Image (cartoon, rainbow, N blue to C red):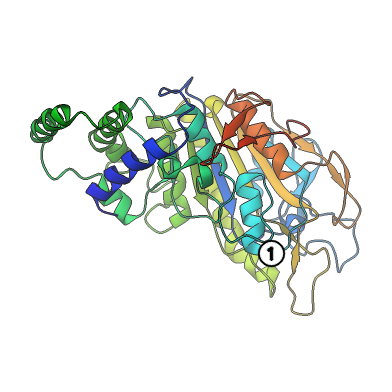
Amino acid sequence: MNRRNFLSTLGATYVAGNLSYSMEPKDDKSVIFIFLSGGISAIDFINPVPDAPLEVRSNRGAIKIHNGEVIGGDFINLAKQSKDWTFVRSYHHRDNNHESATYWSMTGEPNFRSKEDNWPSYGSMVSNQRGFSNKGVPTYVQTQRITGDGPAWLGAGHMGYRTDLQGIENLKPKFTKGQLRRRLNITDAIEKNKNHLPKEWVDLREKGVDVIYGQAAAALNLDKEPAVDKYSAKTSTFGRDCLLARRLVQAGSSFVTVTNGGWDMHQGISQGFERKAPELDTILSVLINDLKEQGLLDKTLIVVTSEFSRTFKINRDAGRDHMSSCNSLLFAGGGFDHGNVIGKTNATANEVVEDEFSPKDLAWTLGNYFGMNKELVLHDHVNRPRPMFQDAKVII
């Protein structure tokens, strides 16, 4: 999408979409939502059940955290930082298909049959309720695309801004702000005489100018960022995206998604974790420390999850297959007390036995964090009322 289409799309969809939100954010809270694509094995990540039979328990070992509980043996830094984390072992749903399970995890709603986005993502919901940032950065940003991360019936004005190469290119001005302002003044004069464009279009166009000439371009420019090496941002896509997420919430974005793929380990799961886990462990640790140093951790909630987990028994290919009955969910920051392990599973970690949570509970947890009302009802493109949190039971 080029710059002209980018601004035009924003304008058109703003007029067509849901207009029930305020134009300014209520406060400076933010979320960095990290999605471990492919289905990370909870047994090898946060619930290693070291006393289970050999064919069940993680062959990656287990490591103690501060309260005597254990997590996967690869996660040395997470164990050291365990007072900063909440580990949820009882989060689950009932979908073992990658695409639809990811959709459920990103929206709080199941989507077993439809190939269409029929429910807005968490980020789009936040965009709808908070409006555009008054700091010249998009409210909702996607560092990479994730299934189900779109706006659905909220309208394309609540799509996340993509930080891929085209998204970064769109933020590079082709001429000075003064030149642009003169062109916009001419456009305003023409449109004033025609008197047919709604005020929302004009407001949105100004927001587009604010994004291009505001802090967004600076936030996405890592040339002078001192933490590049700390995040291994030149060699690790995950590290770069986590660093961009920190810079974006620092600049004023409210919801930033990050993905780390490669966890679909039907074969050789031990070798897979040996290859993948050190990067995840290191970058999550770096992100927490960096947010602390920047004074951002108390107002930035980190969420880490996956579409599902993997079977409790090792298969004949030394891997694990899909299993949605016990997933992984982690929280850090956001001004909450952490250092907890929430929920229990049975001895083979394939069934929740205490403190059951669903994706709808995660949706309500995020909505409550941003100050939304549990009775919130939005209207879709044909004006049908849509209760956003009606099936949620609790805040996790």
Number of callouts: 1
Q: Secondary structure at mark 1?
A: loop
Can the viewer see residue 287 in this picture? no
Q: Position of residue 143 (x, y in %)?
A: 43, 49
Q: Position of residue 77 (x, y in %)?
A: 62, 45
Outermost residue toward the top in this view: 26
283 on left or right of 269: left
Question: Nearest the camera: 386 or 55?
Answer: 386
Query: In the displayed structure, would residue 275 be above or below residue 267?
Result: above
35 on left or right of 6: right
Residue at 59 percent of width and 58 percent of height: 37
Question: Nearest the camera: 116 or 213?
Answer: 116
Which amino acid type is shown beneath numbered disc 1?
Asn
How crowded pointer 1 is (Cα within 10 Å; few <14, some 14-19, many 20+) is rated as some
Q: Position of residue 351 (x, y in %)?
A: 87, 53
Residue at 22 percent of width and 47 percent of height: 4
Assign the C terminus to one quadrant of the image. top right
Outermost residue toward the bottom in this view: 316
**Which of the 4 quarters of the picture holds residue 260?**
bottom right
Residue at 78 percent of width and 38 percent of height: 341
Q: Position of residue 336 (x, y in %)?
A: 65, 25
Residue at 50 percent of width and 48 percent of height: 150
Circle 1 residue: 97
Question: Nearest the camera: 76 or 249?
Answer: 249
